[in-house]
């Protein structure tokens, strides 16, 4: 089947199912172009929370589909590929976090979890953050509590720099963002001296130091649109380039290289294809299912985040 036929069939299935297609900024271009909404985790959470569709086809990775299900327990949430996981989410299994909290009960941790974690970890947390609202939510955390920030140590250390609030950091990371190095970004900066370097806070401290701006993927859109520069080096997953080029066609976007390649693809995000999206809508499978006790507990910190970031 050619891509245009496939795209039309997906749109037809979407109408039949009364479905909405949500896609993360890191999805391939064909999926981004078909989606009803493309955004970062925060924007996707809001859309998932307010949709009146019966079916949510969530084009992202597994924990994102879980987040949509947590806030929409009565809706059917399908994802294109059940194996589309996340190294960052995997770095903090709920059993390990529960054991750590038990062993450190005397610290009475206020647990702040980056949204890139499983439903089980969300259920153990006090509040969820995204890279777009983490600073604001950490500033609002109770002043008399010790904070444990999970699972991304790089985002956590960036938030500590921004807020001055001390936190204990879980030692997790995103395998894509830690591939950018001081050497690889230093070289591209020398090759394009007039371009602004824009990096995601999941990058290491050494890379963040080289950036003109460190921000969430959503903020990258407004920063690149509003900044008086013609070219930008984008230091995050390569899918972001599609969205920037589509929304700001008069500027130049250069993929930040790693030491191994010219751009950075997340192998999990790139497991999703139009064919799998089509089959997901046709069969309503693979479907996200979460035990109700975990879902209900995980909904509380997400709701707190949505309220605090309005
Ligand atoms: S880019 Fe990193 S954080 Fe995002 S899904 Fe891939 S592995 Fe996870």
Image: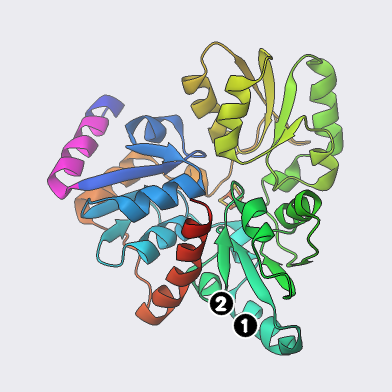
Q: Which residue is drawn at 70% across and 30% down?
A: 256
Q: Relative to 207, is 281 above or below?
A: below
Residue 170 lies left or right of residue 86; in this view the side is right
Name the foreground residue: 251 vs 7: 251
279 vs 304: above or below:
above
Question: In this view of the protein, can residue 48 be seen by the observer?
Answer: yes
Where residue 117 sits in the image (x, y, percent)? 56, 63
**Nearer the observer, disc 1 or disc 2?**
2
At horizontal 43% and vertical 52% (from top left) the residue drawn is: 45
Residue at mark 1 to residue at mark 2: CA–CA distance: 7 Å
Query: Residue 134, relative to residue 40: is it above or below?
Result: below
Q: Main secondary structure of the magenta part?
A: helix
Label placed on residue 98: 1
Q: Please report whichever mark, 1 or 2, sits nearer to the chain's N-terminal start.
A: 1
- The single residue placed furthest to the left in the displayed view is 16
Kindly identify which residue carries mark 2: 124
Q: Of helix, strand and loop, which one carries label 1?
A: helix
- Please state the total of marks drawn on the protein image: 2
User: Is residue 16 within the magenta segment?
Assistant: yes
Q: In which quarter of the image is residue 71?
A: bottom left
Q: Assess mark 2: CB under 8 A from ligand 1?
A: no
- The answer to whether residue 79 of the structure is visible from this angle is no
Q: Give the x, y percent position of residue 254.
A: 66, 22
- Percent across and percent down for residue 111 are 64, 72
Query: Label 1: how many residues lie within 10 Å, few (<14), some (14-19) or many (20+)?
Result: some
**Residues tagged 1 and 2 counted as in contact (Cβ below 8 A):** yes
Q: From the viewer's perspective, is 83 left or right of 1? A: right
Determine which of the numbered discs, if any, sits on residue 90 in the image: none
> Does 71 appear in magenta?
no
Q: Give the range drawn in magenta.
A: 6-18
In the image: residue 231, left or right of residue 310: right
């Amino acid at each position: 089947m050619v891509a245009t036929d496939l795209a039309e069939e997906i749109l037809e299935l979407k109408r039949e199912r009364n479905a909405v297609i949500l896609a993360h900024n890191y999805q391939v271009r064909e999926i981004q172009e078909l989606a009803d909404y493309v955004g970062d985790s925060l924007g996707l959470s809001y859309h998932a929370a307010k949709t009146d569709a019966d079916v949510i086809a969530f084009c992202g990775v597994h924990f994102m589909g879980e987040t949509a299900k947590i806030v929409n327990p009565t809706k059917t949430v399908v994802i294109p590929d059940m194996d589309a996981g996340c190294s960052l989410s995997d770095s903090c299994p709920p059993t390990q976090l529960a054991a750590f909290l038990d062993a450190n009960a005397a610290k009475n941790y206020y647990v702040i979890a980056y949204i890139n974690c499983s439903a089980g970890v969300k259920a153990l947390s006090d509040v969820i953050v995204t890279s777009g609202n983490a600073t604001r939510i950490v500033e609002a955390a109770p002043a008399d509590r010790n904070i444990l920030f999970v699972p991304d140590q790089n985002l956590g250390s960036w938030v500590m720099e921004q807020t001055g609030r001390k936190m204990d950091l879980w030692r997790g990371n995103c395998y894509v963002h830690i591939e950018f190095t001081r050497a690889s970004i230093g070289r591209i900066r020398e090759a394009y001296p007039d371009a602004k370097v824009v990096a995601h806070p999941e990058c290491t401290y050494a890379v963040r130091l080289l950036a003109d701006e460190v921000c969430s993927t959503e903020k990258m859109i407004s920063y690149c649109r509003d900044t008086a520069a013609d070219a930008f080096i984008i230091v995050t997953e390569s899918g972001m380039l599609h969205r920037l080029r589509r929304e700001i066609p008069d500027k130049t976007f250069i993929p930040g290289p790693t030491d191994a390649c010219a751009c950075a693809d997340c192998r999990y995000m790139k497991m999703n294809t139009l064919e799998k999206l089509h089959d997901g809508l046709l069969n309503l499978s693979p479907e996200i299912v979460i035990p109700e006790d975990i879902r209900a507990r995980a909904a509380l910190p997400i709701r707190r985040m949505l309220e605090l970031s309005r």
